[in-house]
Image (cartoon, grey):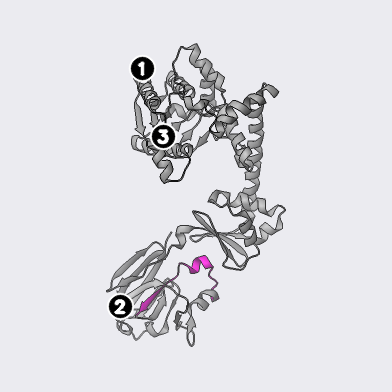
Amino acid sequence: MLIRFKNHINNALPWLHEAKILIAVSGGTDSVALTHLCHQLNLDIAIAHCNFNLRGEESDADEDFVLHLAERLDIKVFTESFNTTAYAKSNRLSVQMAARELRYQWFKKLAIAENYKYVLTAHHAEDNLETFLINFVRGTGLDGLTGIPEVKDHIVRPLLPFKREDLTGFLKTNNLLWREDSSNASHKYLRNKLRHEVVPILKTINPQLIDSFQNTLQYLNESSDLIEDHISQFNQRAIAEKNKYGISYKISEFKRVKNTSAYLYHVFKAYGFTAWTDILNLLDAQTGKQVFSETHILLKNRDVLILSERNSTEKLEPIEITQVPAELKTHKGVLTIVEVNELQQNNDALYLDAEAFKFPIVLRPWQHGDVFYPLGMTGKKKISKYLKDIKLSLAEKSNIQVLCCNEEIMCIPNYRLDRRFAATKQTKKIIKLTWHNED
């Protein structure tokens, strides 16, 4: 087992030899075997143990075992105690999901604080099969059938190619101790039901079940890679523009392909969307229709879908300016206001007549019903009509601000002056406005 593990590390995860590593250790067979294997390979390891306080004295005994394990191996150990039941109740989670969240949140925080590059967990081949079956039973797409990733961000699972019997055999052969978690024998949880009731039946049908499953996973992952390559090529055709407001996708490209819904899923799945029927309906919806995920917005705008982060459309608050010079920083850009001696040839600047207004002035979001008198045009015009005429998308419009004196609009920074406030060659006191968009 040690030789096989060493070969796997050398071939698939060689960078672990140079890294500072934290191993998640419960005290059970899998994590104890992983600890000893890594220790025997002289990897730079420490161990981290979570006490979820779910099994009374048994939980405390697990923690004591891990502390003694670290002492025997002369490696650093970290422990943390959680009130898992209270966390589950306050966050409306199952106890299992609460423990998972608490565990990974702590691992991440600990790794950063103690400068560990990777966190190793002891998931093995049977864990992979059980996860596959859980996803299959609950219903899933291809992503849910490709197994647990061996590497994801800072989490590494080096035991995935190995069976539970491999790990138990390694411990017994080397007379190494471990703890048995009594909750693993319970049929209360779906994973345990599959482990104790379903998987044994499948193994009677196919004694080489795990090996067959590993081959199937390889084929599924290869198929997934093909799909990702194809979607990458599709994106090259479908993406019309990328800018600070988001990514614009040509609706025509989605309508041109068969299985449009599948393309929509694979293009936008990474952004947390779940309402796939609503997203499909966006293709024929009116401009302005939106679908939300927790982190992103998908907006129909004429002949494109615009994907943007939700925080990119946060409400903008008015900002009062009482004097010049001034520099106003918002999460949408920076407005610089200075006095200059003369008009300059600068297409990025607007020039106000300081004698045409009085402080304070206010930078605020534009509102429906706002009107101004655009320089170079006759009469007045609604801001909404002006923004439409210059063909701004709805996402871009949501970021527009106006500079006002009392209720009168002086300009739309970076776009157009109101002629009532515009400086001329005869202006004695000139104010220069420069707007820099957020990168």
Location of residue 96 with respect to 424 vertically, above or below: above
Between the residue at mark 2 and the residue at mark 3, the CA separation in whole angstroms equals 56 Å
User: Is residue 343 something that shows in the picture?
Assistant: no
- What residue is shown with label 3? 117
- Residue extending farthest to the right is 258
Q: Tell which tag, 1 or 2, sits nearer the viewer.
A: 1
Start-end of magenta stretch: 389-405
Residue sitting at x 51%, y 65%: 395
Q: Label 1's element?
A: helix
**Residue 172 magenta-highlighted:** no
Under mark 3, the amino acid is Lys
Between the residue at mark 1 and the residue at mark 2, the CA separation in whole angstroms equals 78 Å
Q: Nearer the viewer, residue 438 or 45?
A: 45
Under mark 1, the amino acid is Arg
Tell me which corner region of the image, top left, top right, bottom left or bottom right, holds residue 291: bottom right
Residue sitting at x 34%, y 37%: 113
Q: Label 3's element?
A: loop
- What residue is shown with label 1? 72
Q: Residue 285's x, y, as percent?
A: 63, 65
For the C terminus, the quadrant is bottom left
Location of residue 334 with respect to 10 vertically, above or below: below
Tell me which corner region of the image, top left, top right, bottom left or bottom right, holds residue 48: top left
Q: Residue 373's x, y, as percent?
A: 45, 84
- What residue is shown with label 2? 341
Q: Residues within 10 Å of mark 3 (few under 14, many from 20)?
A: some
Q: Nearer the viewer, residue 55 or 376?
A: 55
Q: Nearer the viewer, residue 388 or 170?
A: 170
Between the residue at mark 3 and the residue at mark 1, the CA separation in whole angstroms equals 24 Å
**Residue 401 magenta-highlighted:** yes
